[in-house]
Image (cartoon, rainbow, N blue to C red):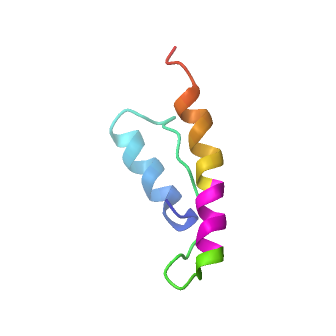
Amino acid sequence: MTDRFVATARAVAGVNGLKDYPFAVIAHPIANNDDAALREKARIAVDAIVPMLMQRAG
């Protein structure tokens, strides 16, 4: 998600009993980004997502 929506996402996660739910966050906005900017934001998202996926549930 983009950083503009982090507070809302954390609130929704908390209401659903997942207050520590991890999110991959990229800079807002994306609507007017060119391909290079979108690729960089995708790279940032992947760098955040891979460790989340590799963690074992405790």
- Locate residue 15 relative to residue 47 in the image: left or right: left
Q: Quadrant of residue 13?
A: top left
Percent from the top left, x then y, of residue 11? 43, 49
Percent from the top left, x then y, of residue 50? 59, 38
* Numbered label tally: 0
Note whether 2 is above or below 23 in the view shown.
below
Residue drawn at (53%, 18%), measured in percent from left and top?
56
Percent from the top left, x then y, of residue 16? 33, 38
Residue drawn at (56%, 43%), measured in percent from left and top?
49
Note whether 45 is above or below 20 in the view shown.
below
Is residue 27 visible from the viewing direction of this image? no
Residue drawn at (52%, 46%), measured in percent from left and top?
23
- The majority secondary structure of the magenta stretch comes to helix
Note whether 57 is above or below 30 in the view shown.
above
Kindly give the residue lying farthest to the left in the view shown.
Answer: 16
- Locate residue 44 relative to residue 31 in the image: left or right: right
- Locate residue 31 relative to residue 39 in the image: left or right: left
Quick check: is 16 in the magenta stretch? no
Magenta-tinted stretch: 37-44
Kindly give the residue lying farthest to the top in the view shown.
Answer: 58
Q: Quadrant of residue 3?
A: bottom right
**Residue in the foreground of this view, choosing between 6 and 40:** 40
Residue drawn at (59%, 77%), measured in percent from left and top?
35
**Residue in the foreground of this view, choosing between 10 and 28:** 28
Q: Quadrant of residue 18?
A: top left
